Image (cartoon, helix red, strand yellow):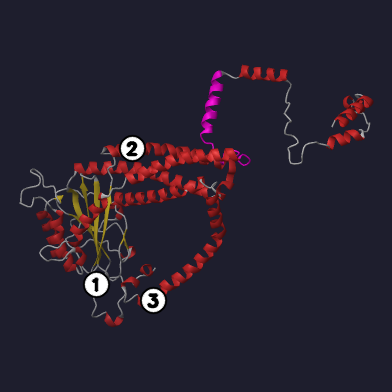
Amino acid sequence: ESHFRASEEHELEAVGKKAWDNPVYNGSPSTSLKIRAIYNPKSILENPYENFEEVGDPLPYQEKQSKAVDGKTSPLLKCCFYIFRGIRGLWGTTLTENTAENRELYVKTTLRELLVYIVFLVDICLLTYGMTSSNAYYYTKVMSELFLQTSTDGRVSFQSISSMADFWVYAQGPLLDNLYWTKWYNNESLAAHSTQSYIYYENVLLGVPRMRQLKVKNNSCVVHDDFKEEISGCYDVYSEDKEERVSFGLINGTAWRYHSEEELGGSSHWGRLTSYSGGGYYIDLKLTREESAEALQVLKEKLWLDRGTRVVFIDFSVYNANINLFCVLRLVVEFPATGGAIPSWQIRTVKLIRYVSTWDFFIVACEIVFCVFIFYYVVEEILELRIHKLQYFTSIWNILDVVVILLSIVAIGFHIFRTIEVNRLLGELLKHPNTYADFEFLAFWQTQYNNMNAVNLFFAWIKIFKYISFNKTMTQLSSTLARCAKDILGFAIMFFIVFFAYAQLGYLLFGTQVENFSTFVKCM
């Protein structure tokens, strides 16, 4: 190395400063300089530029420039800049930071993300489990046993209804007995100055029950010519286009005039046989058993149910203040075109009034934290999407992030809507206690809301694997799943082809004899 330095100094003295100062100098560089340029005593594996430093501008210029910047920048702007930089650092993730060549930064960023996400996961778990109660199952069980299995004096229960005659026996007997509890077992009045019903002495009947039927038009199907003389009418299976909408019977009163789904504020219902609209002919029962029994007797005598009737709904709601739960019941009796009757039911136990106990107010705090987290993650995904553009959607974890955020936003929106709507319904019910309390719509969407939160919580737990992917075992597992994904998809296609073929075969062979094969859905 000293030999090359001596040669370099000798060459510089021989050539002078012309080669460095004069741009038109055409002198050829010496051989020793060429060798000096390509020679490097460092090992090949070492970085030849390791000790190089960026010179930059001369020091006096740097000082002048910094003074100029300091002079132009106000303290307020400086403060805003540092605040913005600090806030921006909150959203530092492996996708927003350059961690490709820095393993330590990658692990540090991933662990920070994992810690924040664990707090979010604990919060969403508290919210989801805070909406459920072990009492809900027992509440549903008690109500189902009372209204579905109980029979009075050996008469039919709801589950044993098999004809229109059985329906009237049940409606005028066990149904009224179970709906109107106004006295203790020793015949003392439950409420001194009220006729309010308290089922099992604990569950208040909200408003009055509603009974609604749907009918089809006469001559809605075609009778063969050979039977036209013997058969006077033909009533097809139910469909909305064949639905009867003409007044009949006594004509006056809601029970004899058709009301559309919009007028009733109802919704469609999927029964055992088909889907039914939310309209029809309805009657609201009374506050007392005697008045309700009298109204049902009039309907029976005037043939409110006839050959055209295809379904009857009995809707009512009860509330238990001890456990703060609503139980919304719908008893359905379908009258198929074959004759007979098919009973079914729908019982939804939901928590519609959220903020009552101390635990409920703790859940309020969790809800506020949840909203803050969702805002945090929305900003995070926007930043990542801005950096990576459409490549962002090539990762399954990013898609999972978007799904969790969207489900959470929908849940927040429905929660606000549900709270407002429940307050409105309860306000109307207090003003008009003798009207029907329609909690069916809210109970349905509350059930869907709970189901959506369950799915969201499942995805949130799955997302944990994203943050432990730097673990060797998890990397091997994810790599194995990725490699066999195509084979699994191919096998799934083959499996479902055979599966649907078998279901179709079973339906065609045994559909008329075996209940489990009576519909294509049951065959699957």
The C terminus: image quadrant: bottom left
Chain-order first, disc 2 or disc 3: 2
Q: Identify the residue position indicated by label 2 in the image.
A: 364
Going by the image, does 29 lie left or right of 231?
right
Q: What residue is disc 3 on?
A: 508
- Identity, as a three-letter code, of the amino acid under mark 1: Gly
Q: Residue at x 35, y 75 (%)?
A: 511
Residue of label 1: 339
Residue closest to the eye, 445 or 159: 159
Please indicate, yes or no, whether residue 438 appears anywhere in the rendered image: no
Q: Is residue 85 magenta?
A: yes
| Residue type for callout 2 | Val
Question: Where in the figure is residue 318, as x and y percent of width and height?
Answer: 21, 50
* Sequence-first disc among 3 and 1: 1
The magenta segment: 75-102
The residue sitting at 51% across, 45% down in the picture is 467
Q: Is residue 462 above or below residue 83?
A: below
Front residue of 99 and 326: 99
Left or right: 294 in relation to 211 = left
Q: Are marks 3 and 1 in contact (CB under 8 Å)?
A: no
**Disc nearest the viewer among 1 and 2:** 2
Residue 213 sits inside the magenta stretch: no
